[in-house]
Image: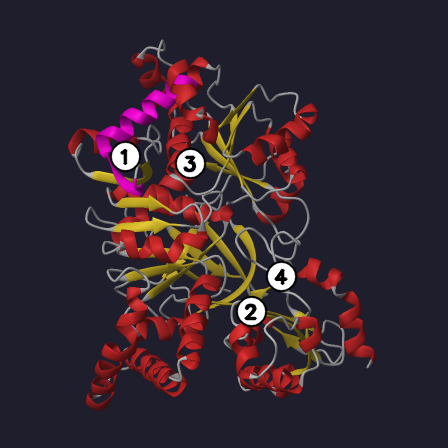
Amino acid sequence: MREFSVPPIVTVGDAANLTDPVWENAEVAPDTVQFARRTRTADGTTWAEVTCLQFRDEVVAVARGLIASGVQPGDRVGLMSRTRYEWTLLDYAIWTTGAITVPIYETSSAEQAAWILADSGAVAVMVETDRHAELIADVRDRLPELKHLWQIELGGVDDLVTAGASVELVEVEQRRRGVRSGDVATIIYTSGTTGRPKGCVLTHRNMYADIANAVPVLPNLFNAGASTLLFLPLAHAFARLIQIGVVQARATMAHCADPKNLVAELQEFRPTFVLSVPRVFEKVYNAAKQKAEADGKGRIFARAEQVAISYSEALETPGGPGLALRAQHAVFDRLVYRKLRAALGGRCRDAISGGAPLGARLGHFFRGIGVPILEGYGLTETSPAAAANLPTGTRIGTVGRPLPGVTVRIDDDGEILISGELIFQGYWHNDEATAETLSADGWFRTGDLGQLDNDGYLSITGRKKELIVTSGGKNVAPAVLEDQVRAHPLISQCVVVGDRQPFIAALVTLDEEALPAWLAGAGLPADTTVEQLREHEGLRAEIQSAVDAANRAVSKAEAIKVFRILPRDFTESTGELTPSLKVKRQVVHKTYAAEIADIYQG
């Protein structure tokens, strides 16, 4: 057993709650721009500034409407919308009334939304679109406690403001001051890679302690001059943490509702840092590599990539990069790297990655081009950030050291255990699941396997439930292989299989954005389907090269012996991905059971 603890910088008092920074900001820095809100004009759309004072006043106005509608302290209020300014406004208004926000992914099915609203006992829900409203209407008969449904696109927020005009301001302040740090702030239903979502109960203290201790150690991200464009779903705990961090630090945040507009909005808003999951960084890298190859500059990009990685690796050595490497890096900075930084807006100094393993390869590449990715680790149950690489201490390939106020322990079987004020209160209406993961003395069992080095840097080696044991008794952590295979620009997803089988195999999907260029290069018609290509010798040779590269990172017994190219990519709508883009392995295994069986019967 190994353990590493970092003492807290900030201790959250009993009377504190997550709305306090909103009120403090309005008093001490009323004119500071807190948000940039996408607003329609006669010529299109633009960014409208929302100051700290304006935001506080808008929160009050919406909170008055919630009070007028009968929302009581402790009531649950659902919120189903894309990432947009109104999401954040409503979240803080709900907290101001003493109620509890229950996020629902905007991509959720009727069955998923019905389960979350029914299980939480929500008395009201704010949705965004007609589709959302129709979806809730279809299950309304299963939601006896649901009294109100408002819709953002039909003026639902304005309706609340109008309804609350008669509510006295003093009542809002009494409600807000009545919220204690131990009160529940949110119930976040984990999208889950297996089974029905479980509601993680997080208090104001849980989330406040997490972000209040993170902001001081990330001053270059969270400061009054910093800005970010948030495009991950705010229903995800990771995005939510950035939201409250921006308010805590009086930084500026804009929301991107449609990821299809992300590149254009990054270049327009020009944030100083971005938050993402590894799959997005992977796609940025793959797109750049593909474009270089299409333009006949593949060899230049390959060399620039190697120099970037070598430069980053050298930063972790005592002498740092040598003179020759620095010179090469400077050349490629002018030729390649600055163009990649421009794709992020040109001002982006840092990035944060979480939600899934980033991998050392991507970490070194992005740091080498001048955009260090600070990889962190946590789960919804840890509010969510438990560990992170910091500007003052980064070891690529790890998820950093525990944040202040957090203790990480590696159990005898390799499982990561976490304790601290950020640990959730349990699963809503699910004592059995709570008892399985939360010990009586406050240790949370993550289900992840990991290692702590002598300096407290944590490495994630796999999931307990995902560990593959071959029929020969070899333990294989699939993530190592999968990350390496996904490095190939043609490959979107890779799922390693082989539990209780004689050897390791892999299911591979192709990147639909990268495929057209490959087809053109191979002299094949643009409308050639993946199904038609699955046995194409040239394509299989490409994938085999990725598999060979991955196999060099593991022992012979762990190596991928066989792979299958699947006829389509994994998507959230077809059930193989969670809203945060994690692969649902059980769904993949079930959907492609025949493919897997064929591998081992062949």
Query: Which one is earlier in the sequence, the residue at label 3 or at label 2?
Result: 3
Between the C-alphas of marks 4 and 3, the distance is 28 Å
User: Relative to residue 132, is residue 296 depicted above or below?
Assistant: below
Query: Which one is earlier in the sequence, the residue at label 4 or at label 2?
Result: 2
Amino acid identity at mark 1: Pro
Which element is circle 2 on?
A: loop
Amino acid identity at mark 2: Asp
Labels 4, 1: front one: 4
Which residue in the structure is indicated by mark 2? 511
Labels 3, 2: front one: 2
Q: Which quarter of the figure has residue 158?
A: top left
The residue under the point 51% across, 66% down is 450
Magenta highlight range: 43-65
Q: How crowded is mark 4: few (under 14 residues within 10 Å), some or many (20 or more)?
A: many
Is residue 371 visible from the viewing direction of this image? Answer: no
User: Relative to residue 293, is residue 178 depicted above or below?
Assistant: above
Which residue in the structure is indicated by mark 1? 21
In contact (CB < 8 Å): disc 4 and disc 3 = no
Judge left or right: residue 148 versus residue 324. Answer: right
The image position of residue 548, as x and y in percent, is 58, 86
Between the C-alphas of marks 3 and 2, the distance is 31 Å
Which element is circle 1 on?
A: helix
The image position of residue 499, as x and y in percent, is 72, 71
Between the C-alphas of marks 2 and 1, the distance is 43 Å
Amino acid identity at mark 4: Phe
Q: What secondary structure prevails in the magenta region?
A: helix
Which residue in the structure is indicated by mark 4? 570
